Amino acid sequence: MAFIDYYKVLEVDKKATEAEIKKAYRKMARKYHPDLNPNNKESEKKFKELNEANEVLSNAENRKKYDEYGENWQHAEQYEQSKRQQQQQYQGNGQQGGFGGFSGGGDYSDFFESMFGDQSARGGSGRRSPQFKGQDFNAELHLDLKEVYTTHKRTLTINGKNIRLTIPAGVENGQVIKITGHGAAGSGGGPKGDLYITFTIENHTNFKRDKSNLYSTIALDLYTAILGGEITVDTFDGKVKLKVAMGTQNDTKIKLKGKGFPIYKKEGEFGDLYISYQIQIPTTLSEKEKELFTELSKLRTI
C-alpha cells in the first residue's frame, strides 16, 4: 500500500496545532461525507483517508510516532523494543564483535528481520508473523436534540460500508461511543480496529439542556402574577397545565419532576424540567388602566 502523507490529506502544515487539525478535519469531513456524496467512490476514498489522518494526527502520542516512523508508526513500540533488545544483546555479547551473536556480518536491517521475520523464508524458519491490531477509525455524527430524546436506529456509511447501530436516548453532545471491530483490518492475523463515533448534538429548541435536566423561561403576564391563575406551558414531549400562585414574583423557579431529558441507558428514567417565570410589565396603558392603577396605588401603602 502506498504511503499516505496525512498532513497533505488534511491540508495542514506539519507544525499545525491540535485545534487547527481538528478544524481542518471537520471542514473536509463535511465536504466529502458519503451522505452528501452518494455513490461517489472518490469521495468515499477521500473520506476514508480523512478519518485515518485525523485518527493519527489528532492524537498526540500517535502523531509523535507518525512523525518519527512515518508509515510504520503503528509498529513504533515493536521497533523500540527491538532496539532495546539489540542494545542488551550487544552489551551482553560485545566481546564477540557482533550484535548479540549475529556475527560481525549482520547489520541493523538483518536484526529487524530476525525480530519480525522474513516473509520469503518464513516457511523454513518456523517464526510467526507478529500480529497487529488494525487502525481505529473516527467519525462524527450530527444529530438534533429532538432525535436523541428517544432511542432509535441509524445506518451510517463508513469507508463504503453500511453500519446499523442503535443510538440510545439521552446521548450527550461530545459523547464518544466505540463500535468494536469496525476499524481497519489487522495485519499478521491481528484483530480489526474499532470505530469511535463522536456525537455532535445541535439544539434548536427553547430548552437549555444540562445532562438530563432541562431549563426554560416562561413569560408571565402581570395580572396572572398578581392574581394567580392557570397557564399552559410547553415541555419537551407536550403541553401541561400549571397553577400560578397569587403574588408570584419575577424569576420564580418551579420544578416539574420527570419532565426533563431521558437519562442515558436508563430506560424510562428522566431528569427534571426547571421553569423560570419572567413577569412582563405592560409598556403602554390605556387611560382606563392608568386610572385603575392609580386607584390601586392609593389603596395600598408600602
Image: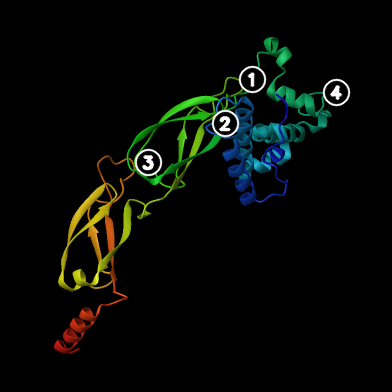
Of the numbered discs in the image, which one, if any, rests on residue 147? Answer: 3
N-terminal of the pair, mark 4 or mark 1, is 4
For the question of whether residue 246 can be seen, the reply is: no
Name the element at disc 2. loop
Where residue 114 appears, as percent x and y from the top left, is 72, 22
The amino acid at mark 1 is Ser
The Cα–Cα distance between marks 1 and 3, rounded to whole angstroms, is 46 Å
The residue to which callout 4 is attached is 105
Looking at the picture, tell me which residue is in the foreground, 99 or 58. Answer: 58
The Cα–Cα distance between marks 1 and 2, rounded to whole angstroms, is 39 Å
| Residue at 33 percent of width and 43 percent of height | 149
N-terminal of the pair, mark 4 or mark 3, is 4
N-terminal of the pair, mark 2 or mark 4, is 2
Does residue 259 appear to the left or right of 54 in the view shown? left
Image vertical order of residue 234 relative to residue 57, above or below:
below
Looking at the picture, tell me which residue is in the foreground, 187 or 88. Answer: 187
The residue to which callout 1 is attached is 129
The amino acid at mark 4 is Gly
The Cα–Cα distance between marks 2 and 3, rounded to whole angstroms, is 23 Å
Where residue 57 appears, as percent x and y from the top left, is 64, 42
Of the numbered discs in the image, which one, if any, rests on residue 37? Answer: 2
Name the element at disc 3. helix
The amino acid at mark 2 is Asn
